[in-house]
């Protein structure tokens, strides 16, 4: 995810320059990132994972679902 700006909570300043003179000298500067849109699994993807998972125990099924969601949301 690409950084879009910096925020200084002590005085409410937002800037694209981390070294902005408007930031307080001892303030904590936080990176700001754009909001992300969640992408879930379609019904077809859910069924494919269910059928493709060898020995569908809870653990192996959850690992397969987690891997697919990470792939779609990174």
Image (spheres, rainbow, N blue to C red):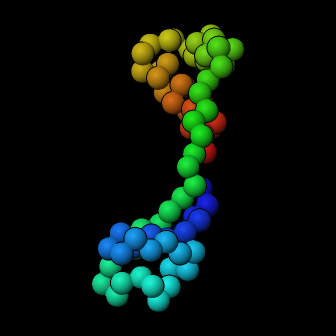
- Place of residue 3 in the rendered image (x, y in percent of width and height, measured from the top left): 57, 64
Outermost residue on the front side: it is 12
How many numbered circles are shown?
Answer: 0
- Place of residue 18 in the rendered image (x, y in percent of width and height, measured from the top left): 50, 79
Front one among 56 and 16: 16
Q: Is residue 18 visible?
A: yes
Which residue is at 54% across, 58% downward? 33
Image side of residue 23 versus residue 39, left or right: left
- Locate residue 45: give its quadrant: top right
Which residue is at 55% across, 69% downward? 5
Front one among 42 and 61: 42
Which residue is at 54% across, 25% downward? 64
Outermost residue on the right side: it is 44
Image side of residue 59 versus residue 65, left or right: left
- Place of residue 24 in the rendered image (x, y in percent of width and height, measured from the top left): 36, 84
Q: Quadrant of the C terminus?
A: top right
Q: Is residue 48 visible?
A: no
Front one among 38 and 41: 38
- Locate residue 34: give its quadrant: bottom right
Front one among 12 and 72: 12
Q: Quadrant of the N terminus?
A: bottom right
Which residue is at 58% across, 12% downward? 50
């Amino acid at each position: 995810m690409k950084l879009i700006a910096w925020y200084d909570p002590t005085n409410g300043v937002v800037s694209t320059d981390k070294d902005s003179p408007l930031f307080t000298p001892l303030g904590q500067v936080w990176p700001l990132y754009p909001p992300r849109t969640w992408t879930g699994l379609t019904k077809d993807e859910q069924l494919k994972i269910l059928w493709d998972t060898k020995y569908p125990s809870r653990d192996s099924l959850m690992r397969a679902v987690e891997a697919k969601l990470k792939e779609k949301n990174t």
